[in-house]
Image (tube, helix red, strand yellow):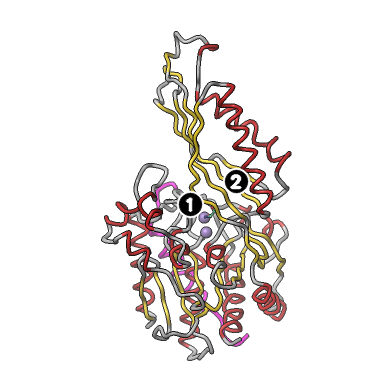
Amino acid sequence: MSIAVNFERLKSDLEELRRIGLADDGGIYRQAFSESDILAREWLKAKLSEAGLIASSDGAANVFGRITKPDDSPCILIGSHLDSVPCGGNLDGGLGVLVALESLRCIKENNIETKHPIEMVAFSDEEGRFGGPLGSLALSGEITPEDLVNAVDLYGNYLKDEMALHGFDVNDILHARRNQGMIKAYLELHIEQGPVLDKEKLNVGIVEGITGLRKWNIRLIGNADHAGTTPMKMRTDAFSGLAEFAGEIPRIIEEHGSDESVATIGKVDLFPGMANTVPGQVEFSLDMRDIDNKILDELSDACRRALSAIARRRMLMFEFDIISEIDPVRCSKDIIDVIQDTAESMDIMYRNINSGAVHDAQIISRIAPVGMIFVPSKDGRSHSPAEWTYWEDMEIGANLYLQSLLKMADS
Ligand code: HGY
Ligand code: MN
Ligand code: MN
């Protein structure tokens, strides 16, 4: 192996990053455009400058780092994201960003000249607090002025206001688009966030397909009534509608989904939310995924039909907003081959794998070929303080990433 990552340095970076947004419950709170998310971006920029790399950011507040000054030659883009879900883990996105940083530092320190320039990125709002993966959507030119006006989180905070709090103008997002052809390829290292690699005691997963996603915000509206005086038969109880739908999900997946289909109700708000009042309205999120787009369409259609039947039967109003629709994608076969050959030359135990999580790579695949390297998640846990990857797996994954990157940058 020509050069290797400085793993002690990578570990200490991870430890420093973990302290940004760490709460007493052990969770990471680096939601997009929160104080700690902004701190993490500033911290990364300082790390880039400390390493003598050229730090910059764009209108979507994506943070970039390069060894050489930007010119008009297509680059190999590498990176991931620093934002997290509330009470999340430090490795989801953070590991990919820091392995990209470490790769750039190694290449610079060893004075390696590559045929194609390499640029790293920490994308904004990959977790989709305000809808979809904002930073990569902005880079691929998919954000419109209308998206910017309406971008709001599940608590009613508008993107434009959250960005303005930190001196960003939401309209600058429209200038973040990279011209077609300016990205030759994209490589991302990420934790698997699932149980497969850990169960099979493998060091690495080489990603073939990345799941598609349909994310809705749903309202069922009935009447708020007195909990004591309203007979059961006279109620239009919105929560009962949700409860019935939640019970229907396993049947809907059995009849319309596949073994890779998942559906999650992650956030529920009841109105008026009092113990002695029949809930007049319920607002909840629905996150549906599958690796096959046709199945995903059938799954979402079946959910829509079930919800309208339940609403009709219970005399409820049913409304839903589509928050995000991301199609499943295949990673580039050429990049998979490069990673595979490199893994074999390094005697790394790997398997090819599909991703049940969505990633910035999915969005970037619309403008460039992409590849992803997974490292195992202990017990498959993620989006939780239990998220962890053994140090040796991180080091093996980081070195595979660096060697694969060097091949891509000279191909
Ligand atoms: O939702 C996801 O799959 C990713 O963590 N944003
Ligand atoms: Mn992630
Ligand atoms: Mn995540």
Quadrant (top left, top right, bottom left, bottom right) of the C terminus: bottom right
Q: Position of residue 170 (x, y in %)?
A: 32, 59
Q: Nearer the viewer, residue 191 or 218?
A: 218
Could you say which quadrant of the image residue 368 lies in?
Answer: bottom right
Residue 14 is inside the magenta segment: yes
Q: Which mark is residue 297?
A: none
Residue type pointed to by label 1? Gly
Residue type pointed to by label 2? Met
Badge 2: residue crowd in 10 Å (few <14, some 14–19, many ≥20)? many
Specify whether 184 is left or right of 67: right
Up the image or down, 120 lies above or below 168; here it is below
The magenta span reads: 1-25
Q: Describe the element under mark 1 as helix, strand or loop.
A: loop
Badge 1: residue crowd in 10 Å (few <14, some 14–19, many ≥20)? many
The residue at the point 55 percent across, 29 percent down is 242
Q: CA distance from mark 2 to mark 1?
A: 20 Å
Displayed-image quarter of ligand 1: bottom right
Q: Describe the element under mark 2 as helix, strand or loop.
A: strand
Specify whether 242 is left or right of 178: right
Q: Earlier in the sequence, mark 2 or mark 1?
A: 1
Q: Position of residue 61 (x, y in %)?
A: 36, 65
Residue 334 is inside the magenta segment: no
Q: Which mark is residue 88?
A: 1
Q: Which mark is residue 288?
A: 2
Up the image or down, 196 lies above or below 177; here it is above
Disc 1 Cβ-to-ligand 3 distance below 8 Å: yes
